[in-house]
Structures are given as C-alpha cells and as structure tokens.
Image (cartoon, rainbow, N blue to C red):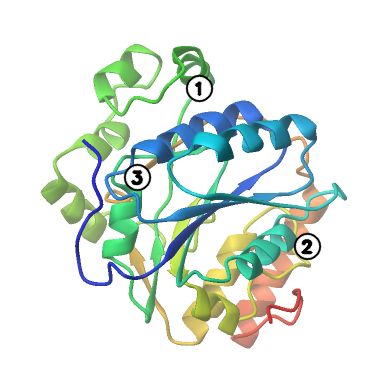
Amino acid sequence: MRYTAIFPGNCMKATVIIVTYNKPKYLKVTLDAYRNQTCMDFDIIIADDGSTEETQLLIEAEQKDHPVAIKHVWHEDNGFQKCRILNKSIKAAKQSDYLIFSDDDCIPFPDFIEKHRQNAKQNQFLSCGAMRLPDNLTEAIFKQGHTTFNFHWLNQNGLADRLKYKRFFWPQWSRILLDKIVPIAKTFNGGNASAFKNQIIKVGGFDERMAYGGEDVELGLRLTHIGMKAKRLRHQIRALHLEHGRPYVNDEMVESNRKIRQSTIDSKRTYSSHHIDFD
C-alpha cells in the first residue's frame, strides 16, 4: 500500500537526482521502482550525460504517467562529464531543499525515499550504497518486467545464499544494529547518498575536473572538512545495483581522480571552484 509518510520535516522538498547515460533499459526498471515508494513526497531530475534519442523518448513517456514530476537535464555527449551534468541538475533543482543522489542502475527499495527524508539533518550527509547483483540476476529482473525485493526470488534467480546479501533483508532492528557495528567506510556514494542542497552548494558541488573513479567520494571529503558528519545507513537505506560494463573507464582518469582526492585530503580543501555558476 502506498502512502505519504508523516514525520518531522515533512514539509521539506526532496529531489532525487538520477544520473544516466545510454542505458534506457536500466533507467526504466529504476523509474518503475520509484512508482511504489512508501513516501511519494519527492520529485525526480534525470541528469543525462549526453544520451541518445532512445533515452529521451523513454523519459518523455515516463513524464506522461509517472506519479511524481520528472525533469530531464541533458547536455551533449562530450565524454564522461558526470560531475558537470550533476552540477547542472543541482542548479535545476530550484525549489528543492534536500537532494538524494542515485544512478540509473540502482533500484531503490520501497522505503528508500522515506528513510532518506527521516534521517535528513543539516549537519550530516547520508552514506548508503547498493547491493551489487550478478549478471544473470540483472537479466532476470529485466525479463520479469518489474522489481522484486524478496530474497527467495533473488536467490532463485542468481543471488548467492550468503550472509552479506541476506542481512539486507533482515528485520529493521537488526539492520540498524549492523549499521553501527559493520566496519564500512562512511563515504559519499553517488549511487545512494543524500544531503541538504545548501550544503552541497556551500562546498562548490562536484569537482568538474574529475572523471570516473571516486568523484562522489571527493565531494564527501569537502563536506566533512566543513564539519558535516557522515551517517552510515547502508543496511537501512537499501538499493539493488544492476550489473553493467564500464567501457568508459581507463587507468589515466582513475589516477587523475586519485590525485585530486589526495590533494583534497592533504589540503583539507572545503570548496571546489571547478563548477558551473549555481546562482
């Protein structure tokens, strides 16, 4: 049953920013999962890093009947420019207070929006993540035509019967405990993270010099340098990560990103000037 959750801060306007690039089949499954959230008080911005017409047509179809408003922010394909399209999307979220970042291959659990909103605080960002699925299970989800969050079905279709997967389906009290005791880094993970928009802009948004490889983590470093705390909710705010290739990745961009991140750490940098004008 779908409903709008009531809790402190319910008047806060939240926006999900979903990054995509030429994966309409993935984006379709992901957008379907946002149709069935326990809290429907949000809108969506699709940050499109230069996809072709097939993605545009899908988005136009979704805009006609999706239960929440969808805005499409696009720029021409000029290589991997995820950080730039993210900054453009942040700027486009003019009425939003709170930003939830995700990707076209990350399927949110039904309580995804509700949990992000419930845990939103000005002095912290939420460090979550996604459970990576194998290739055969990814294909099974595409064939089924809708998303299931039942461990038995996932297991029958390729998810290993292992503790590291099963624990995401345990009762909430145990997942709360896991987030306190499991030693997972409290990083800003672009597939599933959130923070207030004013704090993101305060540190200069995403550093547009960065290509693939920890570009979202670097933003989180600057947020911590201004005094924000990272709250780890990997087992409470859950998403399934569909598998896919990464032909755009090369060693040069990964090394370049590593150097920028290390510079941010060494200098305790709080602000990036490598971004668009947010005004």
Image mark count: 3
Q: Which of these two is toward me, 63 or 214?
A: 63
Q: Nearer the viewer, mark 2 or mark 3?
A: 3
Q: Which of these two is toward me, 129 or 66?
A: 66
**What residue is rendered at 42% in x and 22% in y?**
146
Q: Residues within 10 Å of mark 1 (few under 14, many from 20)?
A: many
**What residue is rendered at 85% in x and 47% in y?**
77
Q: Which of these two is toward me, 29 or 42?
A: 42
For label 2, the residue is: 256
For label 3, the residue is: 238
Q: Which mark is residue 13?
A: none
Residue 243 visible to the viewer? no
Tell which circle, 2 or 3, labels the residue nearer the N-terminal end: 3
Residue 90 visible to the viewer? yes
Q: Residues within 10 Å of mark 3 (few under 14, many from 20)?
A: many
Q: Amino acid at mark 3?
A: Arg
Q: Which mark is residue 138?
A: 1
The reply to whether discs 3 and 1 touch (Cβ–Cβ < 8 Å) is: no
Tell which circle, 3 or 1, labels the residue nearer the N-terminal end: 1
Dividing the picture into quadrants, the one containing residue 176 is bottom left
